[in-house]
Image (cartoon, grey):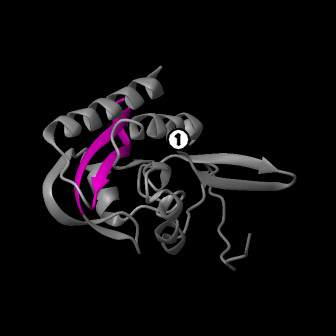
Amino acid sequence: MYTTGIVRRIDDLGRIVIPKEIRKKLRIRDGENLEILVRDNEIVLQKYSVMKNIEDFASNFTDAIYGFIKYNILITSDTSIIACSGPMKKKLINKDISEELITCIHRKENMYEKYKKNLSLTENDNVEATYAISTITHDGDPVGLVIFCSEDETITESEMRICEIAAKILSKYLDD
């Protein structure tokens, strides 16, 4: 932890304002949930992600799908890649996702690209690939993505449907 040198007063309703610079750096958007933790004498705020609770399940899930579909398979939260199977696994796991993917989540987009196109996965990781992307929801809110991508082979419409089904299974898992 480091100090920012910023001091804020608590108002009469117990609220404080998190400075814009800090919200931007930590990718905290309006309306997002923060989790409040207490460590010794400290109050710690951290972004809350319902997806964090399923990281182990997501990892096993991508491995199971990869057993049949030999493409890179990624599962993201609204901020980072939480599970990955395939050749990109070591390179991408636990990295923050790109603004392009964040926008895709907020728009609840399902995308299918059967011709190679540039896809920005993280700030520094772009791939020229065919891909399928489907949004994971929780209580109707978008919380992450399932991504199939291949730099070598064309992803078919059937595999796009499998991507959508995987996102629906994860959504159902979160809702239960």
State the residue lying farthest toward the bottom.
5
State the residue lying farthest toward the right.
40
Image position of 54 (left or right of 37): left
Q: Secondary structure at mark 1?
A: helix
Q: Residue at x 46, y 56 (%)?
A: 79
Q: Which percent across, then down, holds residue 12?
A: 63, 52
Q: Residue at x 50, y 38 (%)?
A: 58
Q: Which percent across, then down, holds residue 175?
A: 44, 24
Q: Nearer the viewer, residue 82 or 161?
A: 161
Q: Quadrant of residue 6?
A: bottom right
Q: Which percent across, then down, holds residue 152?
A: 25, 60
State the residue lying farthest toward the top.
176
Q: Residue at x 50, y 65 (%)?
A: 91
- Amino acid under disc 1: Ser
Q: Which percent across, then down, holds residue 150?
A: 28, 56
Q: For mark 1, what is the residue?
A: 59
Q: Quadrant of residue 108?
A: top left
| Secondary structure mainly formed by the magenta segment | strand
Residue 56 position (above or below residue 18):
above
Crowding at mark 1 (Cα within 10 Å: few <14, some 14-19, many 20+) = some
Quarter of the image with the N terminus is bottom right
Residue 100 position (above or below residue 123):
above
Image position of 114 (left or right of 75): left
In the rendered image, residue 145 lying in the magenta stretch gets the answer: yes
Q: Residue at x 26, y 47 (%)?
A: 133
Q: Which residues are magenta?
A: 129-151
Q: Quadrant of residue 151?
A: bottom left
Counting every numbered tag in the picture gives 1
In the rendered image, residue 94 lying in the magenta stretch gets the answer: no
